[in-house]
Amino acid sequence: MSTIDEIGIIGGGQLGFMLAQASLYLGIRSHFLDPNQHSPAGLVAEGIYKPFDDINALRELAQTSKALTYEFENINYQALQELGVEAHPSPTLLHKSQDRLAEKELCNELGFETAGFLPINNSGDLEQAANKLGFPFLVKTCRLGYDGKGQFWINSAEDFMKLQPKPGVYIAEAKVPFDRELSIAAVRGKNKEVRSYPLSQNWHSEGILRESCPFQMVEEESELVQTLQTQAEAIAKAFLEAFDYIGVLSIEFFLHNGKLLINELAPRVHNSYHWTMSGSETSQFENHMRAIAGLPLGSSKLSKPVRLFNCIGKMPAPRDCLAIEGLHYYSYHKEPRAGRKMGHLILSEPSEESIESVRKLLL
Ligand code: AMP
């Protein structure tokens, strides 16, 4: 199998930036497509600054690359299959993951639990959802929702009267009174080898991920950690194998009454695994690019205790952050904007005291 040394990335945001950066030392050149002239990936890779839905721009990216990958899901998956170069991860799974309804149905078909859900095509479906799921329940747009966008809590009949459903636009989802939010990232190489990272525990607020750390660092009951790790790995492997998947796959779960319910699939690297940049021998970004290049995968084991903090809306001053022992600073070089992921911090060997110090900087 020959090594691929030029990879095109669709999307030049922070994930594209970190993918391109990780591939540099592997001898892989990256190109990316993004309409934004100030894309973070432009700091480390050559950009084609054109719209994502411009088929000629996708062709141009394909011509400069020996394989394609992507950093977000809202991509023309059909075009991806017709560009004449290999595209990973699986455009078929990408297609399913673009629509919350298709994604949940797929999870259930493969035998995995999700929150109860119903497609909402008209007002009658909303009434049925209220009867079946009970108040409060969530209405989410089937497509294009991220960081809690396109989600509405429905607490009463009055709330849903305000919605005007159109066919195929919304899905209703039962509220899961979860104990924890967990995720897994697993990578599959071209030789079909699969490596899984340790489960991550994730804390969101206002639908945006704020903090993550390896689950084993916060759960003392090691038997529970091991059981859930085994279950999550088996779930990830089922998707990886069913779709002959190459690259990193991330799955978000709710842990409810000891059971893992799938919340979302992300056929890409994931924010909840940014801590692998310090806490694992091989980061998720490097392993994703290794997989696509056809290189051997690296260890996904935890190398030291770490905690990830997202910087939302603004970056704290580097001087203040770096005064905290073990804190590492990752800026995405973006223009500050409310709710925007601007960068992240990774704290090595976190203690209650150092965690609190970091949180104060992020207020
Ligand atoms: P999502 O965009 O679906 O990942 O949702 C963002 C966040 O909203 C999740 O990480 C949860 O914190 C919360 N959330 C989403 N769906 C549900 C649900 N069915 N029940 C409870 N909380 C949810």
Image (cartoon, helix red, strand yellow):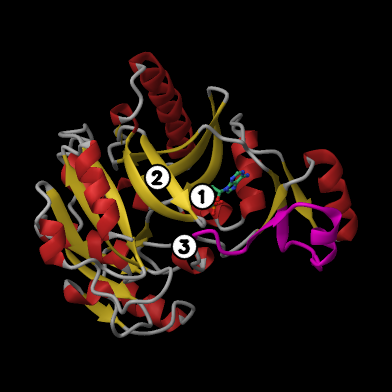
Report the span colored magenta. 147-171
Q: Determine if residue 275 is in view.
A: no
Q: Is residue 280 above or below residue 111?
A: below
Residue 168: image quadrant is bottom right
Q: Position of residue 199 (x, y in %)?
A: 36, 33
Mark 2 is on which residue type? Leu
Considering the numbered disc 1 on the image, is that residue within a helix, a strand or a loop?
helix
Ligand 1 neighbours mark 3 (CB distance < 8 Å): no
Disc 1 versus disc 3: distance between alpha carbons?
12 Å
Q: Position of residue 278 (x, y in %)?
A: 16, 45
Q: Counting other residues with Cα less than 10 Å from the Cα at mark 3, is it few (<14), some (14-19), or many (20 or more)?
A: some
- Frontmost of labels 2 and 3 is 2
Q: Residue at x 51, y 50 (%)?
A: 93
Pointer 3 residue? 81
Q: Residue at x 30, y 85 (%)?
A: 37
Pointer 2 residue? 249
Q: Is residue 221 above or below residue 318?
A: above
Mark 1 is on which residue type? Leu
Badge 2 vs badge 3, beta-carbon distance below 8 Å: no
Q: Position of residue 273 (x, y in %)?
A: 31, 46
Q: Residue at x 55, y 43 (%)?
A: 263
Pointer 1 residue? 93
Q: Closest to the observer: 351 or 5?
A: 351
- Frontmost of labels 1 and 3 is 1
Q: Residue at x 11, y 55 (%)?
A: 26
